Image: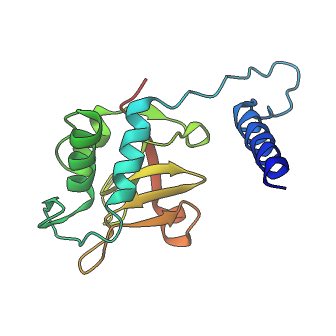
């Protein structure tokens, strides 16, 4: 019995892996429409996402730049990009936005940064996009690093732009 289950489980794993490698369906195109292949996710970006996920529930602290003391949004991004990707991304959320390359919302990839106007100031909040219309961020005083949906009413109304630091 075990001999029959093992090959079946291997077959299921192989089919699952094959499905993961198949290209995503493309949107229908009409005359004059130019389609662009999706950008690949870099290894550095994957490391950024994994590191961000490891900091879930870390406490918030205004001006915080490390998990032991607490993190604010830009401190979290700076810390993660330095540790996970070896990239120096420093300053306020607005400073970070000025240095990144613009990305259309429809082209977001895991590891890209998403910016919001949460204080009646452009680019006053930043988070790390993790895929599936979700991002990790350090929200506010007395908060903790957590995952939010991009279509969360609060953030959807305040979304401004996205930037990338990866190819």
Q: Quadrant of residue 97?
A: top left
Q: Position of residue 118 (x, y in %)?
A: 36, 65
Q: Is residue 18 left or right of residue 163?
A: right
Residue 121 in view of the camera: yes
Q: For this rendering, which residue is in front, 41 or 150?
A: 41
- 18 sits left or right of 136 in the view: right
Residue at x-position 26% and y-position 50%:
93
Quadrant of image for the C terminus: top left
Quarter placement of the N terminus: bottom right
Most extreme residue toward the bottom, as rendered? 142
- Give the residue drawn at x 33%, y 64%: 120
Count of marks placed on residues: 0
Q: Is residue 141 above or below residue 36?
A: below
Whether residue 114 appears in this view of the structure is no
**Residue appearing at x 40%, y 49% in the figure:** 50
Q: Position of residue 81 (x, y in %)?
A: 27, 41
- Establish if 8 lies above or below 141: above
């Amino acid at each position: 019995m075990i001999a029959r289950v093992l090959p079946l489980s291997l077959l299921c794993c192989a089919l699952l892996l094959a499905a993961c490698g198949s290209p995503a369906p493309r949107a229908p195109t009409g005359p004059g429409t130019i389609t662009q292949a999706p950008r690949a996710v870099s290894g550095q970006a994957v490391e950024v996402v994994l590191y961000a996920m490891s900091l879930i529930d870390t406490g918030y602290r205004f001006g915080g730049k490390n998990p032991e003391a607490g993190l604010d949004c830009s401190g979290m991004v700076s810390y993660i990009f330095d540790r996970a990707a070896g990239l120096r991304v420093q300053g306020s959320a607005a400073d970070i936005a000025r240095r990144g390359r613009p990305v259309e919302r429809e082209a977001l990839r895991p590891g890209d940064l998403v910016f919001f106007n949460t204080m009646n100031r452009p680019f006053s909040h930043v988070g790390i996009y993790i895929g599936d219309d979700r991002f990790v961020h350090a929200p506010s005083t007395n908060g903790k690093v957590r995952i939010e949906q991009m279509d969360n009413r609060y953030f959807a109304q305040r979304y401004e732009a996205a930037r990338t630091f990866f190819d």
